[in-house]
């Protein structure tokens, strides 16, 4: 039978409709489409796709089960190595990981591995009524700092081996960046809650509203009887450009803006936590977080949303799918532009004017690409005399985040690099015996799946150390 050269399209909400709601954009494959897409797999002997997956999902094996219509068996294969399959199927950059290694992709479009994974995970959640079986305890206790993708993965892998695991989360809901950073229209919070519930069934204890480094220190965790600690506290410290006007009302970090909308539900008509709605919005940056912030602002009622990015579309780091969705929804891309100043309203005749201190515009300068930098990307260079001002009411800075220094400052002997990332060896072990770390707390802001890979590595190392 001839192989279809193109992967099956993912059905989505109409752009004109979805731009005004927070329902999931991608609607998912039905069973017939999932089987058809899985049937495109060549079942290569050397399985190059697996090498592209940071958690080494047995991709050809689960696709083979889908092809046979054995969807629950496919899920169990994925679950052998991944604790968050429904999340990965939605937000992982498969196009640069597993699908980039797909042999079929040499001649045709690669197999839509992520789309089939999502279908399998959703099928399991909708059809499986049995609780996950809690393994027998092995008597060892491990603490996890942070309930983001690295922490949940580490917790899940250890729980499956019988460890008594407690996850400490600073916010009031478990999930880390999965609940505060990624919008509902990309990753429904019910999906994250279901994944967390599965871990609880395995015996993982989740303690929220506890800030490690403030409520408890890591040293106090060891005093409580934990034999190892994994730090997966993420990178929640926002970066700014240090240009004039960043302290004006209406300037947000993407971190704050998305947390207010996603976790604190500022999208409600009468929210407890306010957020700027309507008007014109500029989002500075070109990554996935910038796309999330821009598309959220649109759904909150913005009349116009700009993405302001200092390089060209070729260098734009966001996923191709997210960029296409943003363009379909009417977001305007100001490429090869860079902000130089944020302008605020000032009425010198009336200091009590309620408009004082609010954003009214942003000065930008046009850029051109010069010689490559140390990473091989052509360096953006300002074009003299090209400054202009755009009329905006809100500016959202989405130019990256850094690890929060709280744990470093409250844990003796924990070495960090010049970016604030915790230094670890090849096993995920820090400079302190018994303390492991991974994910954004080590690397700075990166992908969900890379954080999961780090959590998986640390779990393996902790198990080897404690079971020796």
Image: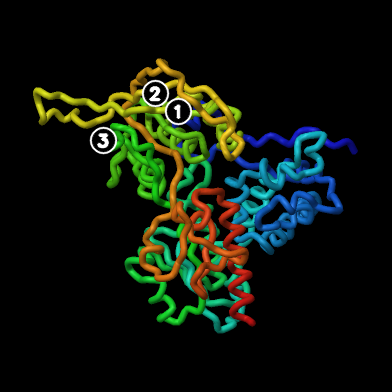
Within-10-Å neighbours for mark 3: few <14, some 14–19, many 20+: some
Instruction: Report the disc number at residue 308.
Output: 1
Residue 145 image position (x, y, % from top left): 45, 65
Horizontally, residue 40 falls left or right of residue 281, namely right
Instruction: Report the disc number at residue 324.
Output: none
Toward the bottom, the furthest residue is 139
Local secondary structure at mark 3: loop
Local secondary structure at mark 1: strand
Residue 151 image position (x, y, % from top left): 52, 62
Local secondary structure at mark 2: strand
Front-lying residue, 184 or 59:
59
Look at mark 2 in the image and give the residue it sits on: 364
Report if residue 230 is visible in the image: yes
Residue at mark 3 to residue at mark 2: CA–CA distance: 19 Å
Between label 2 and label 1, give the one nearer the viewer.
2
Look at mark 3 in the image and give the residue it sits on: 249
Q: Residue at x 60, y 77 (%)?
A: 465
Residue at mark 3 to residue at mark 1: CA–CA distance: 19 Å
The answer to which quarter of the image holds residue 198 is bottom right
Q: Residue at x 59, y 82 (%)?
A: 138
- The first of marks 3 and 1 along the sequence is 3
Toward the right, the furthest residue is 1
**Do the residues under discs 2 and 1 have CB atoms within 8 angstroms?**
yes
**Do the residues under discs 3 and 1 have CB atoms within 8 angstroms?**
no
Horizontally, residue 186 falls left or right of residue 397, namely right
Front-lying residue, 279 or 342:
342
Front-lying residue, 172 or 246:
246
Within-10-Å neighbours for mark 1: few <14, some 14–19, many 20+: many
Front-lying residue, 217 or 20:
217
Residue at mark 2 to residue at mark 1: CA–CA distance: 9 Å
Q: Quadrant of the C terminus?
A: bottom right
Q: How many numbered discs?
A: 3
């Amino acid at each position: 039978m001839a192989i279809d050269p193109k992967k099956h399209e993912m059905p989505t909400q109409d752009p004109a409709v979805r731009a005004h709601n927070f329902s999931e954009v991608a609607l998912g494959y039905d069973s017939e489409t999932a089987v058809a897409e899985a049937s495109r797999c060549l079942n290569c002997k050397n399985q190059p796709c697996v090498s592209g997956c940071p958690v080494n999902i047995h991709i050809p094996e689960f696709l083979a089960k889908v092809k046979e219509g054995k969807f629950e068996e496919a899920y169990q294969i994925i679950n052998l190595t991944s604790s968050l399959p429904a999340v990965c199927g939605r937000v992982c950059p498969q196009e640069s990981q597993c699908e980039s290694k797909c042999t079929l992709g040499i001649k045709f479009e690669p197999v839509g591995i992520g789309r089939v994974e999502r279908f399998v995970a959703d099928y399991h959640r909708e059809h499986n009524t049995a609780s996950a079986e809690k393994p027998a305890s092995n008597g060892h206790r491990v603490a996890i700092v942070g309930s983001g993708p690295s922490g949940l993965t580490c917790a899940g892998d250890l729980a499956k081996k019988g460890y008594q695991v407690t996850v400490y989360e600073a916010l009031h809901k478990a999930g880390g960046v999965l609940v505060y950073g990624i919008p509902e229209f990309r990753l429904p919070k019910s999906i994250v809650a279901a994944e967390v519930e599965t871990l609880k069934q395995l015996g993982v204890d989740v303690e929220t509203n506890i800030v490690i480094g403030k409520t408890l220190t890591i040293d106090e965790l060891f005093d409580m009887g934990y034999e190892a600690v994994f730090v997966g506290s993420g990178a929640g410290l926002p970066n700014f450009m240090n240009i004039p006007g960043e302290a004006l009302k209406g300037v947000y970090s993407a971190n704050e803006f998305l947390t207010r909308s996603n976790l604190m539900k500022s999208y409600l008509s009468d929210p407890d936590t306010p957020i700027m709605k309507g008007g014109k919005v500029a989002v500075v940056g070109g990554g996935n977080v910038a796309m999330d912030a821009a598309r959220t602002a649109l759904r909150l009622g913005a009349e116009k949303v700009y993405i302001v990015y200092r390089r060209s579309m070729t260098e734009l780091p966001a996923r191709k799918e997210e960029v296409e969705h943003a363009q379909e929804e009417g977001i305007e891309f100001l490429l090869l532009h860079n902000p130089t100043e944020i302008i605020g309203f000032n009425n010198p005749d009336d200091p009590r004017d309620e408009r004082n201190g609010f954003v009214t515009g942003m000065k930008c300068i046009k850029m051109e690409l010069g010689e490559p930098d140390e990473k091989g990307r052509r360096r953006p260079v300002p074009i003299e005399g090209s400054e202009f001002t755009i009329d905006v009411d809100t500016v959202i800075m989405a130019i990256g985040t850094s690890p929060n220094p709280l744990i470093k400052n409250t844990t003796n002997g924990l070495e960090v690099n010049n970016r604030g990332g915790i230094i670890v060896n090849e096993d995920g072990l820090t400079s302190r015996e018994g303390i492991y770390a991974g994910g954004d707390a080590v690397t700075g802001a990166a992908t969900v799946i890379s954080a999961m890979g780090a959590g998986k590595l640390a779990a393996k190392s902790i198990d080897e150390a404690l079971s020796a």
